[in-house]
Image (cartoon, rainbow, N blue to C red):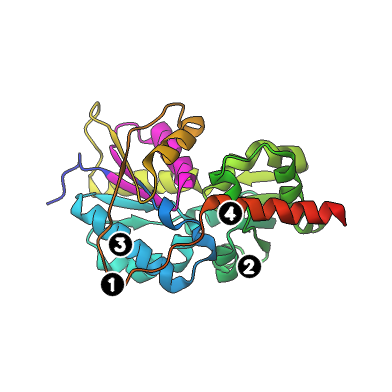
Amino acid sequence: MTNHNQPIGVFDSGVGGLTVLRAMYRQLQDESVLYFGDTARLPYGTRSPQDIRQFVREILLWMAQARVKMAIVACNTSSALALEAVRSEFDFPILGLILPGARAAVGCGQRIGVIATPATAASGAYRQAILEMNPSARVWEIGCPEFVPLIEGDRIHRPETREIIREYLQPLLQQRIDTLVYGCTHYPLLEPVLRQLLPPEVTLVDPATYVVESAGRELDLLGLRATPGRAMTRFGVSGCPQTFANLSRQWLGFVPEVERVTLPDLGPSLPSTESVEPVVDRVYRVVESREAS
């Protein structure tokens, strides 16, 4: 039997899901949270759908063992590629980002750009959801593979990063978008740079805010709101706890205590992606070669 004071599970490939956690701190202050960052296997955006579904099952099984009362998939790639496949396998509500984000975008404009990981963009999940809500909308989805490694590598404010962001935005600016959706929970962390590069009339939509609103409505519907005054957050990662803790400080305002988690084994282990540092270094080599040409 579900206890209303059990935690809500929130997971992402890394620090991006902290944008959802921050929204929970604002909107659901009484709820305890079990946060997981799959940092050993980020970025998710270049993974296959099969990999993503296995990762999500492993994380949700671990959260089920921790007796969460609800889970929020704070990862657009996982929401697009795995949510419907795994939702029926668990006996607690599992919420994703795509529908709340699409609903908010439709309420803001008609010419909608989506910046996302390559996997999310290739899935067409946002385009499909937006057009189902408003068939007359125009939607452009752009895959941005460099963004997550840059954020996880704490290089947001480098001049080179600004040039990378500018290049990805150019096709959307040419289409005169009036709305831009963060199709990855990492991307709101780029907002200071995005605001400098976008026309002031472009509305930024952060699905994190709206998925938390949906979670609140679901809790009310199920009668699972937590008792006031007992909230706490537990942080776990699959990679290095200290790296995650240090990087989290600028988003949370404090250095959290983070534990390393071994997820349930659901079959043959899959190879990890390359580490963040080599990916980031490669990104800057590409930028330097562009400048030289």
Q: Can residue 196 be seen in this view?
A: yes
Between discs 3 and 2, the one toward the N terminus: 3
Residue 142, placed above or below residue 240: below
For image coordinates 35% across by 43% down, the residue present is 216
Between discs 4 and 3, the one toward the N terminus: 3
User: Which label is found at residue 239?
Assistant: none
Toward the left, the furthest residue is 1
Q: Nearer the viewer, mark 4 or mark 2?
A: 4
Label 3, label 1: how far apart the Cα atoms are: 10 Å
The residue beneath circle 4 is 278
Disc 4 packing (10 Å; few <14; some 14–19; many ≥20): few
Q: Residue 259 location in percent, x, y? A: 30, 41
Q: Which of marks 3 and 2 is in front?
A: 3
Between discs 4 and 1, the one toward the N terminus: 1
Q: Residue 105 location in percent, x, y? A: 60, 52
Magenta residues, start to end: 8-35
Query: Is residue 125 highlighted in magenta?
Result: no
User: Which label is found at residue 58?
Assistant: 3
Dot 2 falls on a residue whose secondary structure is loop
Q: Nearer the viewer, mark 3 or mark 1?
A: 1
Label 4, label 2: how far apart the Cα atoms are: 42 Å
Residue 47, placed above or below residue 234: below
How many numbered discs, if any?
Answer: 4
Disc 3 packing (10 Å; few <14; some 14–19; many ≥20): some
Q: Nearer the viewer, mark 4 or mark 1?
A: 4
Between discs 2 and 1, the one toward the N terminus: 2
